[in-house]
Amino acid sequence: DVKVTQSSRYLVKRTGEKVFLECVQDMDHENMFWYRQDPGLGLRLIYFSYDVKMKEKGDIPEGYSVSREKKERFSLILESASTNQTSMYLCASRSTASGANVLTFGAGSRLTVL
Amino acid sequence: GENVEQHPSTLSVQEGDSAVIKCTYSDSASNYFPWYKQELGKRPQLIIDIRSNVGEKKDQRIAVTLNKTAKHFSLHITETQPEDSAVYFCAASKNNQGGKLIFGQGTELSVKP
């Protein structure tokens, strides 16, 4: 069973703080994703990574950066948190094996920025 | 880029009735269309998907239809049960085996006993 683990379920930060959200998967998946989930807006893609040290912007990358130094770990960084980044953040991974296109999600990290 | 619109945002049905959720996509190059179900407090999970080379796919009480010409696809749930209550997300991707997955806004389905 693929495990995607997000290090923090709940975080409370102050405006201007630097925030790190960590995601680790244990099945050697090449692709990893960060989505943001807000009511009425669905799942919006922030960044994704096809493989180690590779990253591509999603639809809402402003205010975020990412790091993929190791295959199993994909970090989302908020350089200077703002109140409009209060949200649920979901990490996901996916294998590129033939026929595989299923995202496996983590449990989510709920971030509140005060 | 791809844009996926999903309707309705909320849907309430009586147990045993059918439920239909519709999505439209903007990029005619999209060729993979999954549906994810997210129960309250849980992570989204894939329930069914369809590729652009077929028009319909069924798995027990759920089915998905695809109209490539009109660029829309739908999820059909028959004989709904209370455990079908959840948020459902449609998505679209350009690549069967890769590429970013763009999700719709979600539909909160409530099945009343």
Image: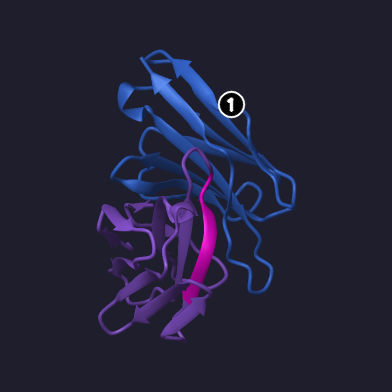
Estimate the x, y position of residue B45 in percent, counting from the top left: 54, 54
Inspect this view and state whether residue A80 appears: no
Residue at position x 58%, y 66% from top? Answer: A101
Instruction: State the colouring used for the structure image.
Output: by chain
Classify residue B21 by image quadrant. Answer: bottom left
The secondary structure type at the circle numbered 1 is: loop
Residue at position x 34%, y 73% from top? Answer: B73
Q: Is residue B42 magenta?
A: no
Is A60 situated above or below B74? above
- Magenta stretch in the rendered image: B43-50
In which quadrant is the C terminus of chain A drawn? Answer: top left
Q: Nearer the viewer, residue B76 or A10?
A: B76
Chain B drawn colour: purple
Q: Residues within 10 Å of mark 1 (few under 14, many from 20)?
A: some
Estimate the x, y position of residue B22 in percent, counting from the top left: 30, 67
Q: Amino acid at mark 1?
A: Ser
Q: Which residue is mark 1?
A: A8
Estimate the x, y position of residue A37 in percent, counting from the top left: 40, 41
Inspect this view and state whether residue A95 appears: yes
Chain A drawn colour: blue
